[in-house]
Amino acid sequence: MIVKADVCIVGGGPAGLVLALLLGRRGVDAVVLEKHETFLRDFRGDTVHPSTLQLMDELGLGEELERLPHRILRQIQITYDGGTFRPVDFARLRAPYPYVMMLPQSDFLELLAEHGNFALYRGADVVGVRRRDRRVVGVTARTAEGPVEVDAPLTVACDGRHSTVRRELGLKSKVFGAPMDVLWFRLPREPGDPEGLAGRVDEGRLFIGIDRGDYWQMGFVVPKGGDEQVRAAGLPAFRAAIADSVPYLAGRVAEIQDWDRVRTLTVRMDRLFRWHVPGALLIGDAAHAMSPVGGVGINLAIQDAVAAARVIGAAFEQGRPPTERELATVQRRRSLPTAGTQLVQRALQRAMLTRALTGHPTTPPLPVRLLDRYPALGAIPARVIGVGLRPEHV
């Protein structure tokens, strides 16, 4: 089957669907190829930051988003042996939405898909990039009904850190070290538990708990490559480590009955030198894989999509696809906030994560102590995490 469109978007995540929605509103014919049949995933990022909430308002979808089941996060708290510290306070933001909304990403994506004027192909696994005279002219995908070829003058890769398009194009990146991986699992949440996002730093251990209402999405942060060692020690040792570090979960660790309930996120951080080639643009994690620190990856990907839609939409309104020089303006606009955010993430990894994972004394680092002692300062990291270094608007 051959599908023709103005723009072929590979990946139906936040960046891909926001881009498709914005292009559809400008009359650009967009096709989205999503590898999976549904948007349901275990432990994908479920944070909607203040700048994204404002963007949804600008799109006229704010009220519908509010009606979806969600939780509100106003502070980030981290517990050390010496007490609990609150270094990040979103409530102090001077913004229309001084909080982070926690809701299943699948619900967020379904809302975008429902209101977008674009073709969405689910279960379409892109396996190759099509070229003509050294220019990308579409992709080839594998579906349950057979192969599909998309013919489009512009392809935008939004297919994440393991991007097929990125691999096929052979694009090179600058790779930054990440000192950790994360083991994700779920445990029931009960009345009287902390609310929001709670971290626990122990001797050589770091746990993160994300309040999902009736359950905790828990992250056990381990040194890079430490997944095999944790699994080799056995489930009883894993459960004991949780109970020791997070005592209020001690009576629930038996819920982890096998390793199938524990998923590993291999953390990587990098940034492409070039986000574009003739006929193709890469945005979001396909262009710059982010650390999970601060949960900012979704926020940055959506802002990339808004910037890209502005350039792509303007070109097609003139009756032509964007030139490579125009695609380069997207990278120039988004490179500074991306590089700045990665710099902050790397600093936090050195100051907090590496210190915790190497078994150093579990007193909080000086920045955490200062931010907790002077609460007004909590608005600074809240702005970097929640709004970003260069927020985009429709």
Image (spheres, helix red, strand yellow):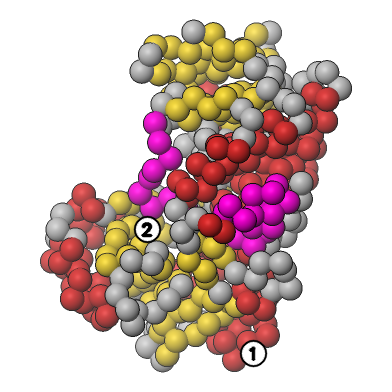
Q: Is residue 39 above or below residue 78?
A: above
Q: Position of residue 243 (x, y in %)?
A: 22, 76
Q: Is residue 54 magenta?
A: yes
Residue 246 visible from this viewpoint: no
For the point 69% across and 74% down, the residue is: 93
C-alpha gap between disc 2 and disc 1: 31 Å
> Mark 2 highlights which residue?
182
Q: Which mark is residue 136?
A: none
Count neighbours of disc 1 (C-alpha within 10 A) and say few if under 14, some if 14 to 19, many if 20 or more: few
For the point 53% across and 27% down, the residue is: 120
For the point 76% across and 31% down, the residue is: 26
Residue 193 visible from this viewpoint: yes
Q: Position of residue 371 (x, y in %)?
A: 61, 84
First in sequence: mark 2 vs mark 1: 2
Q: Is residue 276 magenta?
A: no
Magenta residues (range): 37-65
> Mark 1 highlights which residue?
374
Amino acid under label 1? Tyr
Q: Give 299 or 127, whichever is nearer the viewer.
A: 299
Look at the numbered disc 1 and give the secondary structure of its residue: loop
Q: Position of residue 1 (x, y in %)?
A: 49, 8
Q: Is residue 106 above or below residue 275?
A: below
Amino acid under label 2? Val
Q: Are marks 2 and 1 in contact (CB under 8 Å)?
A: no
Q: Position of residue 198 (x, y in %)?
A: 43, 74
Q: Is residue 184 above or below residue 311?
A: below
Name the front one of labels 2 and 1. 1
**90 to the left or right of 167:** right
**6 to the left or right of 315:** left
* Image quarter of residue 382: bottom right
